[in-house]
Amino acid sequence: MRTSIATVCLSGTLTGKLQAAAEAGFDGVEIFEPDLVATPASPEEVVALADRLGLSLDLYQPFRDAEGVGEDEFARVLRRARAKFALMQRLGIDTMLVCSNVGTATIDDDAVSAEQLHRLGDAAAEHGVRIAYEALAWGRYVDDYRRAWRIVEQADHDAVGVCLDSFHILSRGHDPSAIESMPGSKIFYVQLADAPALTMDVLSWSRHHRLFPGEGAFDLGAFVTHVLRAGYDGPLSLEVFNDVFRQTDVLRTARQARRSLTWLEDVVGSRPLPRVAEPAGFDFVEVRAADTGEVDVLLQQLGFTFRGRHRSKDARLWSEGPARVVCNEQHPRDPEPTLAAVGFGVAEPAVSAARARALRAPTVYRRTLASEQELPAFRAPDGTEVFLGPVSDGDAPWVPEFEGGRDPGPALLTGIDHVNLAESWQCFDEAVLFYSSVLGLSADASQEVPAPNGLVRSQVVRSATGGCRLALNVAPLAWDQSSGFPQHVAFATDDVAAVAHRALERGLAPLPVPRNYYDDLRARYDLSADEVGRMAELGLLHDRDAGRDFTHFYTATVGGVFFEVVQRRGGYDGYGAANAGVRLAAQHRGAPEPGQRTAR
């Protein structure tokens, strides 16, 4: 299946968009008319550039307000159309998108629209081109692809077919299964866009919030399957209007877009990727800085055992049960501690690495001696390094590379429960797609959590078993500009009170929780004064959901990293969202003013 992208998806000039589409691996592009009008390049120069880049020019769009009008208005439509058909000849484009009428329609009659499309088809055929009629979700009379198809059938012209756009169909809640009743030869073009589940007018939703496949809530796998079963053999093309993509780096967005189609081709089976099982869990996390000494102290307070220094790298390993943290001081990207890498335990690292390469995940290279375990690694859009290690019941096979440490004793921690990563507003949707497509994780619905200076947007990508959970967060812009939004690792335990008590005895200063929180806790839940008092002494927070509960505590923040310890009971599957505002407020109080170092 050929791939294409509308130039409206990308930022910059038309020539820059063509170059980015080619470098990202697209076969062709749709020319969005405003991009052509604004470029100083002639149509012939655009064609020459596309030829040099190996790109086909697949569609010219949009042609608006064409049918359902009186004869005087239609005469003006034909004049406009003939000028565009002549331009298409210069561009070598054989298909033009004709949208259902929004602004000038005055006649709600399928027979009139069909007759006018037939006459447009005659004019198109004179120029050796064709028209693809599309039902806009906000069309004045025609807003359903099934009605658009009935009109095309009535038009009965070889040069007149339909364009099927996933957004216009799925945003209206229309059943796409009727696509299979159409002859594939009359489906002239297919445009794809995903979108988040929003309640708003469909025009604003379309103009500002479309996403690439795999980043939203639409079932594009089912949609494309219907299209392919109908016999369509043209390009799968992306048409995504999004305020973020129009501002971000053009090549980065083009690569993101191409990855989304690679993922979708795998979903529908037209171009399968290497099959991988979802990660079994976390292999390790890595904190990196010029000096990670304060992180060492936090880990020791939480009960971790120092396992030694790496034989060839400036790194130290700490573990508590299956939870492993590497403190790396080699080539830090930031002077303050940051969460730099996450390792995942996967059934077949080589196969998972092959899938990552097929999805064009950038490879991370680290010097590895012949005697050391080589772990495939890739860089996520947020800069986090993702490592793929084998699943192991005990110590991972790379642990013996750390020497001079102590043997671990009985453990209170049972592993890494989840990892929270901070995302920039520019790469949030890209990160969701990356982690879900490369690692085979599933994305939960996004939500917003109040912080003192705005809302934190959060979305979890996770394995079905819950053994691997990544929470991706976009901080309020004001927080991001001042001190950076901290990231954290949550460790699991079956006895959070015991872990907290041990940590306090070892000198841990937990995140301060206001007394008001505990007063509210007693009001919300049937807890005794003694129970709440013990929680307050240990700095514990609590949440309940349908008889299931969650108790947890946080450490203070060191640089850009802090830790959490959580206990889940009765199948609780959330993250204590009701307590997130308390945590964010406490961290905000402890954050430095702009230009200051992180408070300790």
Image: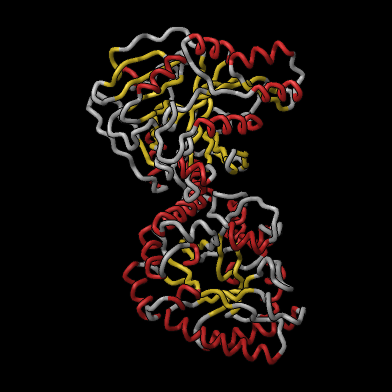
Q: Name the side, left or right, on which 265 lies relative to 336.
A: right
The answer to whether 156 is drawn above or below residue 281 in the figure is below
State the residue in front, 120 or 142.
142
Q: Residue at x 51, y 84 (%)?
A: 85
Residue 303 x/y as whole percent: 46, 13
Do we see residue 380 in this rendering?
yes
Estimate the x, y position of residue 72 in percent, counting from the top left: 68, 92
Could you say where residue 575 lies in the image, as x and y percent from the top left?
A: 61, 30
Q: Please indicate whether residue 361 sits to the left or right of residue 581 in the image.
A: left
Along the line of sight, the residue nearer the viewer: 574 or 121: 574
Residue 533, x across and y down, in percent? 67, 13
Quadrant of res 344:
top left
Q: Residue at x 52, y 29 (%)?
A: 418
User: Is 397 above or below relative to 196?
Assistant: above
Position of 352 with respect to 96 (left or right) is left
Q: Nearer the viewer, residue 71 or 324?
A: 324
The residue drawn where x is 53% and y is 63% is 239
Residue ID at (74%, 13%): 528
- The chosen color scheme is secondary structure
